[in-house]
Amino acid sequence: MQGSVRKRGKTWSYRIDIGKIGTRRKQKEKGGFKTKKEAQQALTNALNQFNSTGKLFEDKKITLDEIYNNFIENEAPITRKFSTIKRYNSLYENHLKETFGFKYIANITATEIQSFIALKAKTLSNEYVKSIYNFLLVLFKYAERMEYLKTNIIYNVAPPKVVHSDDIRIYTSDELKLINERLSSTNLQPAFQIGINLGLRAGECYALRWSDIDFNKKTVTIDKQLQYYNKKWCFTSLKTKNSYRKVTFSNEFKKYLLELNQKQKLSFDFYKDIFKKNLIIDTNNNNKPIVVTDFVNIKPNGEMLNTYSHKIISRITKNEFGIDFKFHNLRHTHATFLLEKGVNPKYIQQRLGHSKLEFTLRLYTHVTENMDIQVSHALDSILK
């Protein structure tokens, strides 16, 4: 393949002879270079690119808005989970659209993105800023795969460093007893009990149906979560494939669930019309609308509770007991209790639905450090 440079008016351009296609010769020309040297360097880069890839790439005039919409419509439904797409939508609308949406993606510079990331880091958490960066990475890689970009500048942007916080709150037995007693007269106690006894995530807890519970085997099947999307409550897929699991429960908790189930059955006959208003969009089944009459977490009249409900628990515990409550900390408390009782960490990983054992151990270093001390004391006693 051959090429040449020439001056056209006040600027320089390069031209590449691609060769004969059919009965006609095809040439590629690109101009606008200020000097002959710039045109020659661009020609060399283009020839090297063709020799290594067999293609001549050229930046296309397409905005980040168009890239985003193409990705969401054509690739994301195939490669991403419903919950991930929902998160992408939020990140784009709230953070990326206003700053970059109208710009041609080929014109966005690494410096612009680096400054944007630094600005976001001043007001948002490290983890959230990293999620914004990761989504930009997704969009730019998509543009690169679709050959909208000749050079992907995202690789020149330094990713924000995520500092894992140590603000995991483990509730004491006295705190758990206090909260449980306070909630015993409310419709919020079942969610609290499920959190501490099963270690479920909030979305998993509020998606729970009586049909998911096997009282004979004392197991709960976790295969969906409840999320709010497009002003509707939806059943969505779980976080990872390891999140799909069966969780066993104790005899004591079995008694609690049976009593709760019996109580709700009595309410159903009286409030059946309200029970039948619990309409859910099942995204795991082609967005099919379904009526759910067997939610575990409901109001006395049968109306479903949802992931916003535990915010009421937070308000109660903060105002009345000075306890900072987060539903997810029940999951941490559950796991810590099992670890301290000597339960195998691998089993706990599977029970919680973590993808890797390393994540479980890193999350509960406060427990494993205590275990190290106990082992040291045990070895000391052996040597003595």
Image: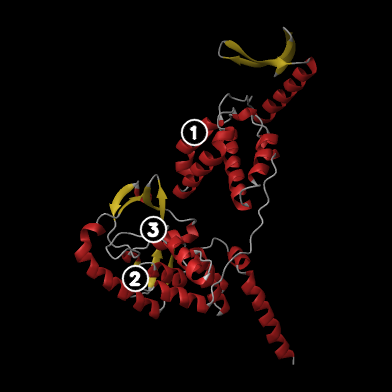
Relative image position of residue 271 (x, y in whole percent): 22, 62
Residue 249 in view (yes/no): no
Identify the secondary structure beneath mark 2. Answer: strand
Q: Residue furthest right?
A: 37
Badge 1 density bin: few <14, some 14–19, many ≥20, Cα 10 Å: some
Q: Residue furthest bottom?
A: 384
Relative image position of residue 309 (x, y in whole percent): 41, 60
Relative image position of residue 37 (x, y in whole percent): 80, 18
Disc 2 to disc 3, how far (Cα)?
Answer: 22 Å
Which amino acid type is marked by label 1?
Answer: Asn
Which badge, 2 or 1, is on the more N-terminal residue? 1
- Tell me whether the residue at label 2 lies in contact with that at label 3, contact meaning CB atoms closer than 8 angstroms: no
Q: Circle 3 is placed at which residue position?
A: 306
Residue at the image position 40 percent from the left and 67 percent from the top: 191
Q: Circle 1 is placed at which residue position?
A: 70
Which amino acid type is marked by label 3?
Answer: Asn
Relative image position of residue 380 (x, y in whole percent): 73, 87
Badge 2 density bin: few <14, some 14–19, many ≥20, Cα 10 Å: some
